[in-house]
Amino acid sequence: MKTLLRGVVFAVLAAGLWLLYRETLGVDPAQREQIAFILNDLRQIDAQWDVHVLRSKTGLDKNYDPLTRPQVAALQVLESSGGKLAAVDYRLSDSEAKLKEALLAKIDLVDRFKAQNAILRNSLRFVPLAAEDLKTKAREAGDATPAKRAEMAALVESVDQVLIDTLKLETARDAELNGSLRRRVTKLVERRGDYPKALGESFDTFLNHVATISAQKEREDELLEQLGRVALAERIEAVDRGFMSAFDRLLGKRDSFRLMLYAYAGFLLALVAFLLGRGSRPETGPAA
Amino acid sequence: MRTVIKTDRCEMQLRKKAMTIGIAVAAALAAAHPARAQMLDEPIKPLPQKMDLDARKVDLGKKLFHDKRLSKDNSLSCASCHDIAKGGVDGQQFATGIKGQVGPINTPTVLNSGLNFRQFWNGRAATLEEQAAGPVHNPGEMGSNWQEVIGKLSKDAAFVAQFRAVYPDGLQPRHIQESIATFERSLITPSRFDRYLLGDSRAIDEDERQGYQLFKNYGCIACHQGMGIGGNMYQTFGVLGDYFKDKGKITDADLGRYAVTKNEADRHVFKVPSLRNVELTAPYFHDGSAKTLDEAIDVMFRYQLGRTAPTADKALIVKFLKTLTGEKGMQ
């Protein structure tokens, strides 16, 4: 009975030691560096994205690889961070989910921006050629009669005006200008006469591109506004703040447990010393 | 003082001589090795000279890619549709699955697929690993599942031994996917045009160079750019003309990215395909409707560029496109 009791007391004391020891292992200091590294990567990716959106908008980037690379990298970074934050503190899973949401929103908007930008730049590049072709064909058609000449001169003048407004749109973010361009185009379409086939085709091609530029310019403004509203940088900072404070809390907790472990170990050592002392004391039997 | 001035003069004369000799040597080297000229700054970028991949995984992936046990009835492997010797495609309008089932969409090439920013025509897979699982599980393609595949493969002791040498924890779906994807990433096909981009001006002839200029001038380059010459963006099919109205009878495959996002703006939006090896990958487009490159170019001019071009210009563009075919033998 006495041996059993001793065994139980020993087991309880050992379990206490093990529990305290386990609590001091709860935090791996390398985790802080890993997460800081991941968040820094995301910050850089986000900054690169913004730079390359502007460079693509202005035509400085010759292809969309620089804009696409951050998309792929961001997904990989997010994948590698999966669960690491929640492992530190379950409350961080919410900020991690919000960060992922912002990242996916930005990826989607950048995808849309690339598609829109390619169309806009193509049509902007072609529209002066299309206008020139239309004017040449209009002048040729105007050779028939004086009435036709006047009609075609008016057409040429309108085409010039539409072209100027269209090209102005490239640099301006002006909804009013876009609206006035659309009104001019509508008038041009209403005045469309019974044109010879070649002139009619040239007219349709020109207006098709003008309409495309007008629509895509509007789309570009919307997309850039939406991109500006994606709070990716803020979400990264929120995760960073949340993680660092959770990590500091864990470190504090670990330090408390470490102190407790030292005290407990000291107590156990004292106990062992006491027991050993008792065991080695010479037995003092009754005097003979 | 005089000695100092004399030494300075000598030094200057020596420098002049050294510069003259240096310039002469540089000029001689440039003339002798035109290929060493500077890399061109173009919207299309050359393929990497070397891929940093695990050779054991590539080898294992190659075996799996050609393994018919990945299909339910052991009749098809990935290579059945993505024949590497034929440009990574099957040459058919639509893919054929097990029991002769005809699929809804044209097989995209597996060559250079590692450069694509997403996989499948509608971009529904973010990585090649994710893509690798698609056809295996599709009842209309290979009609199997990982459990069944692993069951069959695990009976092959030699294969299991090779697999364990690469992945010590044995046959797992994620390892199968990773090895196939690694093999696919190794399938890059440097072409004559890459040599041209790297500075070898003699790698393409004058017609092909003109064709490239026209490719840029007409605006094809707006979408087909970058290292993959496409594959890095989505685009609406029918930007300046209604392709699907003219085509009639719209199928689910025609919905494009809309099938993934259910966003109306994504209707008829597809991943822009890479033009590398385009000479070998007919028929073209997701619906395999263009049988030749000339037909495909006509459709692109009409619906994507909204303009026309003389036949001679289109012929030159075709010549340029043929310079994008990989030079090494594909096996």
Image: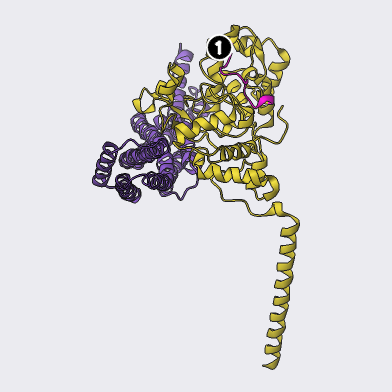
Chain colours: A purple, B yellow
| Residue in view at x 48 percent, y 14 percent | A3
Residue furthest bottom in the image: B2
Which of the pair B20/A156 is nearer the observer?
A156
What is the quadrant of residue B316 in the picture?
top right
Residue A282 location, x and y as percent? 52, 28
Residue B80 location, x and y as percent? 64, 17
* In the image: residue A240, left or right of residue B186: left
Subunit under mark 1: B
Which of the pair B272/A31 is nearer the observer?
B272
Residue furthest front in the image: A145
Tag 1: amino acid: Val
Residue A2 location, x and y as percent? 46, 14
Q: Is residue A78 visible?
A: no
Against B111, residue B66 (above or below) is above
Q: Which residues are magenta?
A: B85-97
| Residue in view at x 58 percent, y 43 percent | B212
* In the image: residue B181, left or right of residue A259: right
Read off the residue under disc 1. Answer: B102
Quadrant of the frame with the N terminus of chain B: bottom right
Which of the pair B238/A127 is nearer the observer?
A127
SS assignment for the magenta stretch, majority:
loop
What is the quadrant of residue B133 in the picture?
top right
| Residue in view at x 64 percent, y 16 percent | B77
* In the image: residue B175, left or right of residue A263: right
Quadrant of the frame with the C terminus of chain B: top right
How many numbered badges does the structure rendering display? 1
> Is A5 a magenta residue?
no
- Characterize the local packing of mark 1: few (<14), some (14-19) or many (20 or more) Cα atoms within 10 angstroms: some
Q: Determine whether the residue tagged by mark 1 lies in a helix, strand or loop.
A: loop
Against A37, residue B260 (above or below) is above
Residue A162 location, x and y as percent? 31, 47
